[in-house]
Image (cartoon, rainbow, N blue to C red):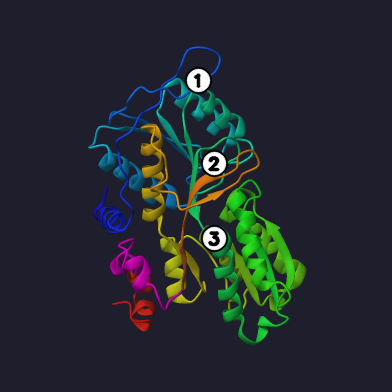
Amino acid sequence: MNTRMRRAAVAVAATTMAISLAACGSAKESGDKAEKSSEKKGDDLKIGLLLPENQTARYEKFDRPIIEKKISELTGGKAEVVYANAKQDATTQSQQVDTMITNKVDALILGAVDAKAIANSVKKAKAEGIPVVAFDRLAEGPIDAYTSFDNEEVGRAQGTALLEALGDKADGGTIVMMNGAITDPNAALFKKGAKSVLDGKVKYGKEYDTKEWKPENANANMEAAITALGKDKIDGVYSANDGMAGGIITALKAAGLPKLPPVTGQDAELAGVQRIVTGEQFMSVYKSYPAEGVVAAEMAVALAKGETLDSIATSKVDNASQKGIPTVLVPVISLTKDNIKDTVIKDGIYTIDEICTGKYKAACDKIGLK
């Protein structure tokens, strides 16, 4: 792990609740149905970590190393983390779960590619006595715990910032709505939160659900919106994340607009932060990946040891098949050029030198990033 990630993980870990690591574990019983047993488990655990894709920088750059580091800390370095990335393929992820079950992992941390399609795999794990922590996306099936961000609040933060950026055009202006993938339940929550702020104020010129969250798909959608509406008729763009914002801004530039309309984002990706510095992108949403990753690790280790989550989970949510799932929702922050220092730099996610490389230095100097 690099120095930046160590700083970020240590900073958040210091503020994260400690959990007790003394309890009973689980083992597969003979017969048709596996049940929890009283066999005691120590720190010699095997935790499966399945992440959904590598298009978005966060999963490989932040989530994986943070989770692996915390699991190691919680188990004195004795636990093994078995890792797989589905690269946005739901079938591949189902096969990866099957492999984890065959390898007899003690718990799974699952960032679902397709929240509905993965339900049968979750059932298989449950049948083998393997607890499942839904990570970042609320998977279907009998999951045991869930941690994510307050996803409706993400949308509200995006919508509120867009209205602020629109100024006089916040009342009756025309925007393009670029939502995330319909296979990701978070995308619907982002949309719901944003529309709770935007409805009745702006006009939706065009709206898209972007396949697989891919920037190139957002770029194509934006080109279609510009053709349909006219480049001078777009007052702002709601983009559900930073990757798509990059594709959107490329399309806007190619259309030759004299001034770019405000564009939202999410994830505080380095490229997104740099676009905020230059003014090409108005905002992003900073989500503390260290906080979310630490909670996922704590949940997985506790469940693998047979512990309750009473000292970790602060709330409960339901999915289509399971009620009262122990849940931790991590707060989010609206990120603009005014609070870059107080968020991603302060938390050790990026350094000023990483953000303010040669082509961005003048813009950084202008907003006081020195």
Figure check: 198 above or below 71: below
Q: Which residues are magenta?
A: 336-355
Q: Amino acid at mark 1?
A: Ala
Mark 3 — residue? 241
Mark closer to the observer (1, 2): 1
Residue beneath disc 2: 112
C-alpha gap between disc 2 and disc 3 = 18 Å
At 58% from the left and 76% from the top, the residue drawn is 260
Question: Which amino acid, mark 3?
Answer: Asn
Q: Which residue is mark 1?
A: 34
**Where residue 361 sits in the image (x, y, percent)?**
34, 75
Amino acid under label 2? Ala
- Chain-order first, disc 1 or disc 2: 1
- Residue 338 inside the magenta-drawn segment: yes
Query: Disc 1 vs disc 3: which is toward the camera?
Result: 1
Gap in Å between the C-alphas at discs 1 and 2?
Answer: 24 Å
Nearest to N terminus: mark 1 or mark 3: 1
Q: Residue furthest right?
A: 228
Mark 1 lies on a secondary structure that is: loop
Mark nearer the viewer, 2 or 3:
2
**Other-residue count near label 3 (Cα within 10 Å), few / some / many at <14 / 14–19 / ≥20:** many
